[in-house]
Image (cartoon, rainbow, N blue to C red):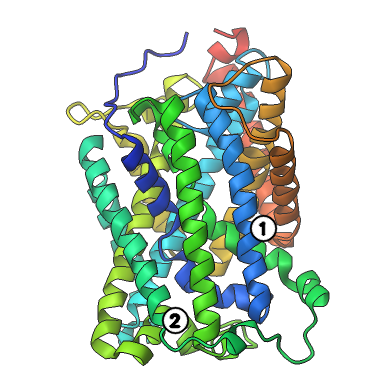
Amino acid sequence: MSASRPALVRGVGLLGAVAVNVITMIGIGPLITIPLVLGALHGPLSLIGWLLGAVLALCDGLVWAELGSAYPRSGGTYGYLLAIFGRVGIGPLPAFLFVWQTIFSAPLLLASGYIGFANYAGYLFPALTGSPLALKALAVGVGVVTLVALYRGIKTIERVSVLLGAIAVLTLLSVVGASFVHWSPHLAFTMAPHDSFWAGLRAGLGSALIIAMYDYLGYSAANTIADEVVAPARTLPRAIGIAITLVAALYIALQTGVLGAVPWQQFVPLADGSLPLLGQHLASAIVERVLGAPAAIGITLLILITAFASVYGNLLGASRIPYAAAQDGIFLRPFAHVHGHHRFPDVSLVVIGGLALVACFFTLDQVINALTAGIVLVQSVAQIVALFVMRARGTRAPYRMWMFPLPALIALAGWIYIFCSAGTAPIIFGLLSLILGACVYFVGAVRWWPPLENGE
């Protein structure tokens, strides 16, 4: 029998759920990855990467929406896989593998935000850019602050999330507005010499889509804290749709504005893979050109707050996944511990947050590729398969996907394409971590988690 679940506090309404999704999605990602997208898809072709990313995010979001309404509990994908594939025999294996992958992927995702924060802070403190050790120290420091900020009750977290969400949206709107002050449609939509539409897509679409989906990830963050959401079966699908629509519009407007504000060749990666100075602090540089240095300093501070908002939302959601599994007896028992006063999963929060500090010592591109390949097979592909199994059994969720099965098939094809485009090393990392997780599961099923053997 699974352990009784301590009562968490349902303190997150629709506004809070949308805010959690939005801050987890936006962060500093688009402001530091636009040069990487343009390095893969030149000039106006980059807009196709963001548009296709939005389509894939929406299709996958519909999968999350239906499963979240059917099984509204903390843990997100973990809970869906366990409910659909069951507890008997190897039924819990997909759910366990998702939690196992979370232990690897969540710290990588958080570290990418911490590293991005540190890199962008170099605009305010140029000495940082010349000191790799100082950058790593700042990244770790941001991670510690994030962990401390989340070590409290959910009602306080909801209020902070709404505030951070408003700042994140304001930040992107400010950068978009600045980029359109001296905007040139000719500069924005003219193809580079010797570039062609189809050849350009073939050469760089996979890489660009990986980066775009990295920036869109987070649209389902509220699903992972469903036990703390008010009326989750109704709130979660609405929060996903609102968040994706809002953020996609901001991303596409941002990319369009940047294309018409500065010649894109000036901020794409150099031959050695490094970014020129303009590419490292693109948004601040655009604001400085239009409104001057004081305004650029102000926007940089907003960007850093937005970067913090993203890791705040990511760590919040990730910490609830091992907790939910441990509550069911399918993961290490200490992760089920709940803070005695504020009623939040304190052990899970500290472990995930602590591992993210270690991951800060990798480079940003290593983190993004390893993260993407690591989550696709178990979270994205297995979850879509689970939706088809649920439908085949006749289970009717409170929220039903539009035009089923088309969005689910589009999401499935998109994720497989992204996985195959990630590169050899990240693919090997993703597969080996799954194989290792399966070994741990089968040992654990015999020695550590006896309920898995008899389906209790």
Number of numbered discs = 2
Coordinates of residue 233 in the picture (x, y in percent) = 45, 25
Q: Quadrant of residue 203?
A: bottom right
Name the secondary structure under disc 1. Answer: helix
Q: Quadrant of the C terminus?
A: top right
Q: Are marks 2 and 1 in contact (CB under 8 Å)?
A: no
Report the front residue among 394 and 118.
Answer: 394
Residue 444 appears in the rendering:
no
User: As displayed, is residue 354 above or below residue 45?
Assistant: above
Name the secondary structure under disc 2. Answer: loop
- 301 left or right of 65 in image: left
**Residue lying at 56% horizontally and 19% vertically, measured from the top left:** 447
**Residue lying at 50% horizontally and 43% vertically, measured from the top left:** 241
Residue 417 appears in the rendering:
yes
Coordinates of residue 264 in the picture (x, y in percent) = 58, 86
Coordinates of residue 81 in the picture (x, y in percent) = 60, 26
Disc 2 residue crowd, few under 14, some 14–19, many 20+, Cα 10 Å: many
- The amino acid on which the numbered mark 1 sits, given as a three-letter code, is Pro
What is the CA distance from the residue labelled 2 to the residue labelled 1? 38 Å
**Residue lying at 71% horizontally and 27% vertically, measured from the top left:** 388
Q: Quadrant of residue 181?
A: bottom left
Q: Tell me the residue that label 1 is attached to.
A: 426
Looking at marks 2 and 1 on the same chain, the residue that comes earlier in the sequence is marked by: 2
Coordinates of residue 165 in the picture (x, y in percent) = 32, 54
- The amino acid on which the numbered mark 2 sits, given as a three-letter code, is Phe
- 337 left or right of 195 in image: left
User: As displayed, is residue 331 above or below residue 407?
Assistant: above
User: As displayed, is residue 73 above or below residue 157?
Assistant: above
Report the front residue among 123 and 298.
Answer: 298
Disc 1 residue crowd, few under 14, some 14–19, many 20+, Cα 10 Å: many
